[in-house]
Image (cartoon, rainbow, N blue to C red):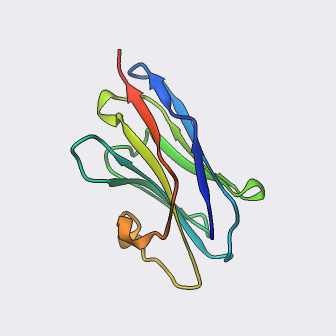
């Protein structure tokens, strides 16, 4: 069983920056797919950024150019660097993971049902 633990949420003013982290207890396969999702009150969970074991990244249009997904493989830790934050970025952010041997196509990496493991979520509030 893989456990994911997020950290780094909080409150920030518009145009501010924040880094989220997601530490995994283990990676059972060398092939993996990692992602950040977010869910605002009253809205569906949506994919924000995704990263696979080959280093390929995907971003939602709403965060392209402002958010960066990355990882520290030695620490089994996933990051989300968020810059120029906007009030509409306010949400609970979740990290998610899916491990091989199967392949997850790029067109499905923002589908929550494709991920088996989830973190507990961390709240990000962007407000003046």
In front here: 48 or 66? 48
> How many tags in the picture?
0
24 is higher (above) or lower (below) than 11: below
In front here: 15 or 96? 96
In front here: 123 or 21? 123
User: Residue 126's spot in the image, x, y percent?
Assistant: 38, 26
The reply, left or right, for residue 99 in relation to residue 92 is right
Extreme residue in the top direction? 128
Extreme residue in the bottom direction? 102
Say which quadrant the C terminus sits in: top left
56 is higher (above) or lower (below) than 47: below
77 is higher (above) or lower (below) than 116: above
Q: Please report the residue visible at 32 percent of the width from the left and 50 percent of the height from the top.
A: 61
Q: Please report the residue visible at 72 percent of the width from the left and 59 percent of the height from the top.
A: 73
Say which quadrant the N terminus sits in: bottom right
Q: Please report the residue visible at 29 percent of the width from the left and 33 percent of the height from the top.
A: 88
User: Residue 87's spot in the image, x, y percent?
Assistant: 31, 28
The reply, left or right, for residue 12 in relation to residue 112 is right
User: Residue 21's spot in the image, x, y percent?
Assistant: 60, 44
Q: Please report the residue visible at 69 percent of the width from the left and 60 percent of the height from the top.
A: 25
In front here: 4 or 105? 4
Extreme residue in the right direction? 74
User: Residue 112's spot in the image, x, y percent?
Assistant: 37, 64
The image quadrant that residue 59 belongs to is bottom left
């Amino acid at each position: 069983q893989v456990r994911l633990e997020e950290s780094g949420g909080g409150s920030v003013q518009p145009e501010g920056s924040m880094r989220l982290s997601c530490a995994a207890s283990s990676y059972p396969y060398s092939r993996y797919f990692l992602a950040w999702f977010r869910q605002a009150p009253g809205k569906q969970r949506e994919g924000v950024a995704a990263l696979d074991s080959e280093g390929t990244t995907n971003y939602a249009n709403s965060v392209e150019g402002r958010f960066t997904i990355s990882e520290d493989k030695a620490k089994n830790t996933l990051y989300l660097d968020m810059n120029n934050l906007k009030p509409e970025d306010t949400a609970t952010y979740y990290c998610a993971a899916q491990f091989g041997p199967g392949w997850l196509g790029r067109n499905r990496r923002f589908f929550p049902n494709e991920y088996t493991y989830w973190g507990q979520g961390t709240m990000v509030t962007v407000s003046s």
